[in-house]
Amino acid sequence: MRLKCPLCENEIAEGARFCSKCGSALGPDATGFIISTTPSIPGYKIKKILGVVTGLTPRTRGVLGQIIGGIQSMFGGEITAFTIELEKARMEAMERVKAKALALGANALIGLDLETSDMGVQMGIVVISATGTAVIVEPE
């Protein structure tokens, strides 16, 4: 059986520390912790609901990033300076919600919801939140 990244389902090489597709850190529990956006996990039954957990990460672009983003926006298309920062923030929020679920004793997280909020154009702060329900599951 091939190992899969718990976040993006990409096949990972044995002993890998990071997923080659999404960049997620792969710890010793990487293959045992399940994260799902759905309220259930096919092939598993929920044994115990531990509660709602949230991981937040506020991000801002530094002056150089804002300059690069401003230059890229003049030409149209994707602003890669912001895309990279948002992807890092998304992964960080997911790692934080997973850590909180693990701290409660969960082996899975269901109903994962990722949201982005802008704290105001003037402030230039974007908050990424990852919220889900920490649960203990077992195979059916």
Image: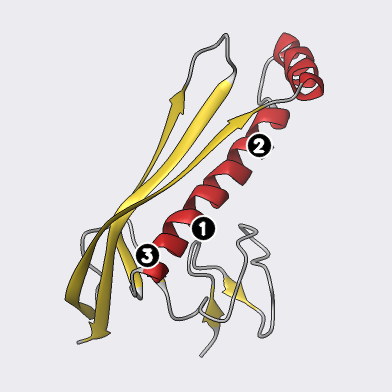
Against 42, residue 25 (above or below) is above
Q: Residues within 10 Å of mark 1 (few under 14, many from 20)?
A: some
Residue 52: numbered disc? none
Counting from the top left corner in percent of width and height, residue 104 is at 33, 69
Left or right: where does residue 129 sit relative to residue 17? left
Q: Marks 3/1: CA distance?
A: 10 Å
Q: Secondary structure at mark 3?
A: helix
Q: Which residue reaches farthest bottom?
A: 1
> Identity of the amino acid at label 2?
Glu
Instruction: Determine whether label 3 and label 1 are within 8 Å by CB.
Output: no
Q: Marks 2/1: CA distance?
A: 15 Å
Q: Which residue is mark 2?
A: 85
Q: Residues within 10 Å of mark 3 (few under 14, many from 20)?
A: many
Q: Nearer the viewer, mark 2 or mark 1?
A: 1
Residue 101: numbered disc? 3
Q: Which of the two discs, 2 and 3, labels the residue nearer the N terminus?
A: 2
Q: Secondary structure at mark 1?
A: helix
Counting from the top left corner in percent of width and height, residue 64 is at 82, 22
Against 105, residue 82 (above or below) is above
Q: Is residue 111 visible?
A: no
Q: Which of the two discs, 2 and 1, labels the residue nearer the N terminus?
A: 2
Nearest the eye: 89 or 81:
89
> Identity of the amino acid at label 3?
Ala
Q: Which of the two discs, 3 and 1, labels the residue nearer the N terminus?
A: 1
The residue drawn where x is 23% and y is 79% is 44
Colouring scheme applied when the structure was drawn: secondary structure
Quadrant where the C terminus is found in the figure: bottom left
Left or right: where does residue 99 sit relative to residue 83? left
Q: Which residue is mark 1?
A: 95
Counting from the top left corner in percent of width and height, residue 55 is at 43, 49
Q: Nearer the viewer, mark 2 or mark 3?
A: 3
The residue drawn where x is 61% and y is 57% is 22
